[in-house]
Image: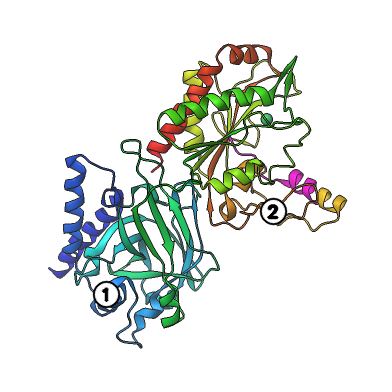
């Protein structure tokens, strides 16, 4: 009989973990979602907690917005999950961490979820304080179990759906016996706290600020840094934006050429349309150049100066960026088409929306050149392979600096890489004498960026179609980005 009861509890927990998003969806206004939310809480409350001692102890240190240890020798303290990397990319929080198998007891991990524990609630049962949860990955590796919120950088905990409140970050591990272990996240990194601003809510132009932090008093008390997250309504600071629009090239860097047409002028024309359209919809948008730049500027090399595109974008704390380009190839091509590049470390969801919308709205087609950069229909990631690594080593030798710490698979396109900070392994740290320094190389927050090659200037038919339908290409980019924003959960 007892076994049956435990099975029922297991099923309830499994459902809770699988239906996680309902619990943290703050924007849901319809009744159906509200009901599900209530139901989830109720189910958590009825959840049987087998490790009573440990949970009671955790209860002590999540109360009152600071950690309190009543029993200094309590062994729950050893049950923290050590975080060795955490970051926000676009709209998602992700972390990597591990815990020794010994600390988990002899049982193996069956499933794991990242939970927001609402510390303002005074309930005795910690499980009733779970305000939101997502299923996360785990892997047994020798004497440790490793965890991450997602294997790609643009998924994980969707910050846009976090409700207002203050939460302790926990991983809840379900072991092979159906027990739930509540493991607080302990920050073992040197990373700074993250300040995140949500994308502007178009209904009431409101924003929220989210802080992912480790309180100082915790550090003093136990020489340990547990991770918290708070979220509250706040007006967007003047210098913070939702979206960055980057017209490719500029100044003396004209980009591709077709007759008397320069890519830098066409990318700017499209970018301005996209910029105006998104702004009119209510988003706060930054454009990285407006065409007033000097023709003597080498804009590739000035990207890291104060008014350079990397600096402007990174300083904006935007969630999304589109870098707009036109393509060209020396190869004799009968067909051109759209190519959307995304980070090799991201999944293709945002790029997919962009490619599909541009194809539909501009009545064009995707470019499927194939090759190792193509990930799916019209969606590409150009990453460092043997050729690119050799190239970067040769440049380093030529200028006499130690090669960048770049790895196979890192993004080759600098706008995709440098806007992502540690999530994309940005590396332009000033050692190359021709470039400046990206001050956000070590930032643990980054912008989800796609580089959009709209058409081939070198393919007559593709280029003519583009020239006749520029407004439709711009509309496609806007619609694709909005779909990504609305569906990027
Ligand atoms: Zn270009």
Question: Local crowd at mark 1 within 10 Å, few (<14), some, or many (≥20)?
Answer: many
Tell me whether the residue at label 2 lies in contact with that at label 1, contact meaning CB atoms closer than 8 angstroms: no
> What residue is shown with label 1?
59
Question: Local crowd at mark 2 within 10 Å, few (<14), some, or many (≥20)?
Answer: some
Quadrant of the rendered image holding ligand 1:
top right
Q: Is residue 366 visible?
A: yes
Looking at the image, is mark 2 or mark 1 nearer the viewer? Answer: 1
Q: Residue 392 location in percent, x, y?
A: 77, 48
Residue positioned 29% across, 69% down in the render: 177
Q: Is mark 2 within 8 Å of ligand 1?
A: no
Quadrant in which the C terminus is drawn: top left
Seen from the viewer's position, the closer of residues 259 and 20 is: 259
- Mark 2 and mark 1 lie on one chain; the one further toward the N terminus is 1
Label at residue 406: 2
Q: What is the span of residues highlighted in magenta in the rendered image?
A: 380-393
Q: Residue 222 location in percent, x, y?
A: 42, 82
Rendered image quadrant of residue 331:
top right
Q: Residue 374 location in percent, x, y?
A: 60, 34
- Side of 74 where 342 appears, left or right: right
- Side of 104 where 188 appears, left or right: right
- Residue 359, above or below 62: above
- Residue 389, above or below 173: above
Residue positioned 59% across, 46% down in the render: 419
- Side of 261 where 196 appears, left or right: left
Number of labels in the image equals: 2
Seen from the viewer's position, the closer of residues 129 and 78 is: 129
Rendered image quadrant of residue 180:
bottom left
Residue positioned 18% across, 41% down in the render: 32
């Amino acid at each position: 009989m007892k076994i049956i009861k435990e099975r029922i509890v297991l099923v309830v927990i499994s459902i809770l973990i699988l239906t996680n998003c309902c619990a943290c969806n703050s924007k849901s206004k319809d009744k159906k979602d509200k009901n599900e939310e209530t139901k989830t809480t109720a189910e958590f409350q009825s959840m049987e907690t087998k490790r009573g001692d440990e949970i009671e102890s955790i209860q002590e240190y999540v109360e009152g917005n600071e950690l309190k240890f009543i029993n200094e020798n309590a062994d729950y303290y050893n049950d923290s999950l050590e975080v060795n990397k955490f970051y926000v990319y676009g709209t998602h929080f992700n972390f990597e961490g591990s815990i020794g198998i010994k600390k988990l007891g002899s049982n193996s991990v069956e499933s794991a979820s990242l939970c927001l524990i609402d510390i303002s609630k005074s309930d005795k049962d910690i499980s009733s304080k779970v305000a939101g949860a997502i299923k996360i990955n785990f892997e047994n590796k020798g004497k440790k179990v490793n965890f991450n919120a997602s294997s790609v950088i643009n998924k994980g905990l969707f910050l846009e759906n976090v409700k207002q409140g203050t939460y302790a970050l926990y991983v809840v591990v379900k072991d092979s016996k159906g027990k739930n272990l509540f493991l607080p996240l302990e920050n073992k990194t040197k990373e700074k706290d993250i300040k995140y601003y949500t994308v502007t809510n178009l209904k009431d132009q409101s924003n929220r600020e989210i802080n992912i932090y480790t309180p100082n008093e915790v550090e003093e008390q136990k020489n340990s840094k547990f991770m918290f997250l708070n979220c509250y309504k706040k007006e967007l600071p003047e210098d913070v934006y939702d979206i960055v629009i980057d017209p490719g090239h500029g100044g003396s860097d004209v980009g591709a050429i077709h007759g008397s047409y320069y890519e830098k002028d066409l990318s700017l024309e499209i970018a301005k349309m996209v910029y105006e359209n998104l702004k009119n919809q209510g988003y706060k948008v930054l454009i990285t150049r407006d065409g007033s730049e000097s023709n003597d500027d080498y804009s590739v090399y000035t990207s890291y100066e104060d008014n350079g595109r990397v600096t402007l974008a990174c300083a904006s704390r935007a969630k999304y960026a589109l870098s707009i380009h036109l393509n060209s190839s020396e190869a004799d091509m009968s067909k051109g088409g759209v190519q959307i590049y995304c980070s090799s470390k991201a999944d293709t969801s945002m790029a997919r929306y962009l490619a599909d919308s541009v194809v539909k709205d501009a009545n064009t087609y995707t470019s499927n050149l194939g090759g190792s950069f193509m990930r799916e229909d019209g969606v590409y990631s150009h990453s460092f392979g043997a050729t690119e690594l050799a190239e970067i080593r040769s440049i380093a030798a030529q200028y006499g600096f130690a090669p960048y710490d770049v790895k196979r698979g890192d993004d080759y396109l600098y706008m995709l890489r440098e806007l992502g900070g540690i999530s994309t392994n940005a590396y332009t740290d000033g050692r190359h004498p021709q470039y400046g320094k990206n001050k956000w190389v070590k930032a643990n927050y980054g912008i989800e960026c796609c580089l959009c090659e709209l058409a081939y200037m070198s393919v007559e038919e593709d280029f003519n179609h583009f020239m006749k339908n520029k407004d439709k290409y711009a509309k496609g980019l806007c619609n694709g980005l909005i779909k990504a924003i609305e569906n990027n959960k």
